[in-house]
Amino acid sequence: MLFRSQWSNTEDAWLITTVPPSALASSTALTGPLAGLLQQVQRAAGGVKFGDSVAATVAFQTDTAQNATQMANALQFLANMAQMQGGQNNQQLAALAKGLAVTTTGTTVKISLTLPEAQFQQLLQMQQKKATAVPHAGVRN
């Protein structure tokens, strides 16, 4: 189960939704290989713990244990693909995928990612540079 006290007692920042994520997104936003499995998510939670390492955790509660297992298998497959592709083209993507763990307990899928704080800072700086490099549309009179 995804209880508030579980997240508030262990994470520095956290969120919980008891509304199925599929109800929050438009029907066109849920496409791709995980779309069918995401429709089975009943609630979700996530949190981040800061320190020498930054640990992010996301949990999805599905309607059945079988759907949880299918979702975990699909996520692990995508992580393995990212690690293989990242190793060839993008070392940071490979490192992220390598630090990813996907587990199931009953109807819950848990995704954990732990990064050294320095690597987390690098990723934030890269995202900041990308955001400032994107030209903004202007308005002409």
Image (cartoon, rainbow, N blue to C red):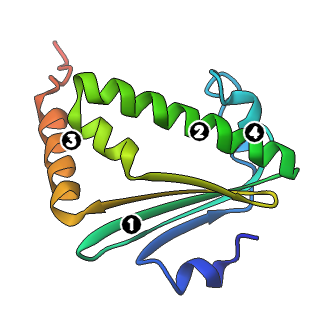
Viewer-proximal residue among 128 and 49: 49
Gap in Å between the C-alphas at discs 4 and 3? 32 Å
Image position of 107 with respect to 128: above or below: below
Disc 4 + disc 1, Cβ < 8 Å: no
- At x 27%, y 77%, the residue is 51
- The residue indicated by pointer 3 is 127
Circle 4: residue type: Gln
- The residue indicated by pointer 4 is 70
Chain-order first, disc 4 or disc 2: 4
Chain-order first, disc 4 or disc 1: 1
Q: Circle 3 — which element?
A: helix
Give the left or right position of residue 93, taking residue 14 as reference: left
Give the left or right position of residue 13, taking residue 4 as reference: left
Gap in Å between the C-alphas at discs 3 and 1? 18 Å
Circle 2: residue type: Leu
- The dot on residue 55 is 1
